[in-house]
Image (tube, grey):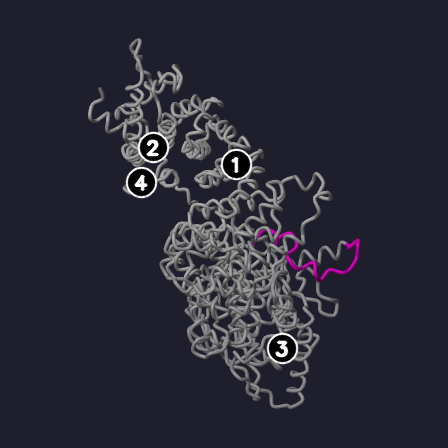
Amino acid sequence: MLSPNDKMLGKLDPFYQPSVSKQKTSAEIISEARNALRTVRTQRPFTPQEAQRKLFGPASSRTSENRPPSSFSLHASSFESSDSRPISGTRLSPLELRINPSSSGFGSLTAWSWEGWNYTEFQLILLTLATPSLLPLLPEVLGDTSSLGFMRLKPKVPASPTREEDSCFSFPKPPVDPVKIRRVSNARARLFRAASQRALLPDRSLLPSNSKKTVESKETVMMGDSMVKINGIYLTKSNAICHLKSHPLQLTDDGGFSEIKEQEMFKGTTSLPSHLKSGGDQGKRHARASSCPSSSDLSRLQTKAENIETVCAACTQLHHALEEGNMLGNKFKRRSILLKTLCKLVDVGSDSLSLKLAKIILALKVSRKNLLNVCKLIFKISRNEKNDSLIQNDSILESLLEVLRSEDLQTNMEAFLYCMGSIKFISGNPGFLNEMISKGAVEILINLIKQINENTKKCGTFLPNSGHLLVQVTATLRNLVDSSLVRSKFLNISALPQLCTAMEQYKGDKDVCTNIARIFSKLTSYRDCCTALASYSRCYALFLNLINKYQKKQDLVVRVVFILGNLTAKNNQAREQFSKEKRSIQTLLSLFQTFHQLDLHSQKPVGQRGEQHRAQRPPSEAEDVLIKLTRVLANIAIHPGVGPVLAANPGIVGLLLTTLEYKSLDDCEELVINATATINNLSYYQVKNSIIQDKKLYIAELLLKLLVSNNMDGILEAVRVFGNLSQDHDVCDFIVQNNVHRFMMALLDAQHQDICFSACGVLLNLTVDKDKRVILKEGGGIKKLVDCLRDLGPTDWQLACLVCKTLWNFSENITNASSCFGNEDTNTLLLLLSSFLDEELALDGSFDPDLKNYHKLHWETEFKPVAQQLLNRIQRHHTFLEPLPIPSF
């Protein structure tokens, strides 16, 4: 006699049968147990690093005719004097220089008349006297005045000096003789020609010619053992410093000079990089073309390098002095004089010196052509990766960012272009990452994009060079977004909508769109950034427009499709929004057809592939697009409103099946697996007009070659598809006729949870047919199921539930447990089920709290109800001969 409860259990339907109530089909059981609809992962498209630093790389869509140059010549003559005050045609009168005769150094000079000297050069003399390290600048700037007749010193009878005259200079008076004026003008012309020919700094180690012997007297200045030639005059460093001790000078707010203390005179000097000490970075350019240079040539090179090093240190000291005196910017009265001097030194050709000069020039807030030229100067230097250390040591990045922050975009578009080009180059060096982030580079660049977007919207047209500038900005951001800190900044300042707007406005500029696509492909690999972009509803139409516009541009399309795959991977709302866009499915189908044809044409006949073709190789460009595209199809098919539409689309299904026909795992593993995963998701939907259902037997036949491969990922995807298709009676017959069921039972020994789960799902569907249940005994299937339950059940209650459901279906007509399962397997089942139904034993695993709650949920809702029914059935039909031992786990 059966109790009422036992009678009720005996009347329960098998798990495979559908029910009008809450009973679920085996497909629903499988999908709930292991999410039959799966997203697909893939790698981000690879972007090789450019071999050379250029504004636009070799992959740029711009031709050489319609893009700014990356190489150009730049000389002192390139700079203009418009940043300086206009020079009046009036010359100042000759200067009477009165110095206290009792002082040392220059004090040995009584009084002198300076003829042919203009006010600008006089101020430069004062500047160099105020900063002793700038003494070597004078010969380079003013030339050899002894040979040009540029300056003559005439002794005059000294007047009785007053206290006031001892401490200050009188200003020079303009010459009245027109001949003298012409003579000065001619000398200046020769000077500029010499400067444009990149004349080097003087060689201080060379002695003057016999005609210019230096003697120790009151009319000349001796400098001990070290001689310095200044406009035909040889000075020693010691005496020059002695003079400065007695008359130290410093720049004042109005551009003049005042006395300073000796200890402050050299304040701010810095040491130069060590590589300058061994010959300089550009000194070799001026060496004679000789395979065996003489000792004098080597001496000259070394001396020139030392001169450059001295001038670099002087420039550093000058910058510090100007900064401390609050004379940077464009308010400094003698700014034009200083700018003219600095610009002339550009022709020296030293990268280290040019960076020093550029930093001072930028700090003086130049504009127009001078701003463009100084940005070009830094750009030229930054093209050489070896100069990155110089750029970092001189903090040039801060000066460049200040240009972008403070200067007007529309007025200085071309200067911004080369400024951004330099920033782009150094952004590729990881050593600059922290500095760029800390100095606000991300915020500055996003604000720059925002300005360009607003100007374009306001004007209704593109500003000149704005597209070229956007290429540099977006390429820089592409280098930075690998940092988690930068990604968080992107989210905080709403950078993603600005990038989308730029891409939309400049959708005709492939370089801009490609760079932004590279940024998005990096960002959407992270969940928070992916969610932020997915919430920007306009992005889907934008990406579809780009696919249609650049359908054959692989480097852009592959990234856009990769982004869509990321957006639709975890977000069901994104799947819906994308599918609702006009012609979204047609666009994907058209892209599929385009690259499918390209891939077919690139394939070699099977007989000509050889052994090398079987070796694993990276996907071709066409294959890479197809990989990313099938991923998008697999992801959007998860949506219940989109999946049936795709399953009923003959074009989509046809191309997927064609991919499995002509591609093997050896040809392109990822493409074959993605195509199979897409078919798996589409096969989930049991709709009348499904092309998958119409071609189910052909699909099953195509899957056989995956089952017999050595690729476990390919096997797993094929088994998953069989799990959905085996709900059909015809497919079950195909499985048995081709011994696929034996393969499924063999997979239970794989000790791989996902493979065992999928294989068990196929066996569960086979047990729907009473005539096919016997196959579980023929292949030792019962024992394999019991072993699977024992080995994997405690860590996977979903798999344990599926095993119990399969055994429940198998034992529907049970009369004796031992004859149904076998005596040994019956005893094992009784032990396992009794133990697994004990909550303390079953959930006594060393899991963290979250994982333990997950296991408990599946144990209570899925495993426990089925296992309890199976245990009751076995106990009712089993004769206990002896007590069963309690197993230990």
The picture quadrant where one finds residue 150 is bottom right
* Number of marks drawn: 4
The kind of residue on which mark 2 rests is: Pro
The alpha-carbon separation of the residues under discs 3 and 4 comes to 117 Å
First of labels 3, 1 by sequence position: 3
Q: Is residue 278 magenta?
A: yes
Which x, y percent locates residue 39?
44, 46
The alpha-carbon separation of the residues under discs 1 and 4 comes to 26 Å
Residue bearing mark 1: 734
From the viewer's perspective, tell me whether residue 192 is left or right of residue 710. Answer: right
Q: Are marks 3 and 4 in contact (CB under 8 Å)?
A: no
What is the number of the mark on residue 153?
3
Residue bearing mark 4: 19
Q: Are marks 1 and 2 in contact (CB under 8 Å)?
A: no
Q: SS for tag 2?
A: loop
Q: Is residue 184 magenta?
A: no
Position of 68 relative to 763 (above/below)? below
Q: SS for tag 3?
A: strand
Position of 37 relative to 80 (above/below)? above
Q: Which residues are magenta?
A: 273-294
Q: SS for tag 4?
A: loop
The kind of residue on which mark 1 rests is: Phe
Residue bearing mark 2: 14
The kind of residue on which mark 3 rests is: Leu
First of labels 1, 2 by sequence position: 2
First of labels 3, 4 by sequence position: 4
Which x, y percent locates residue 562?
50, 54
Q: Are marks 3 and 1 in contact (CB under 8 Å)?
A: no
Q: Are marks 4 and 2 in contact (CB under 8 Å)?
A: no
First of labels 1, 4 by sequence position: 4
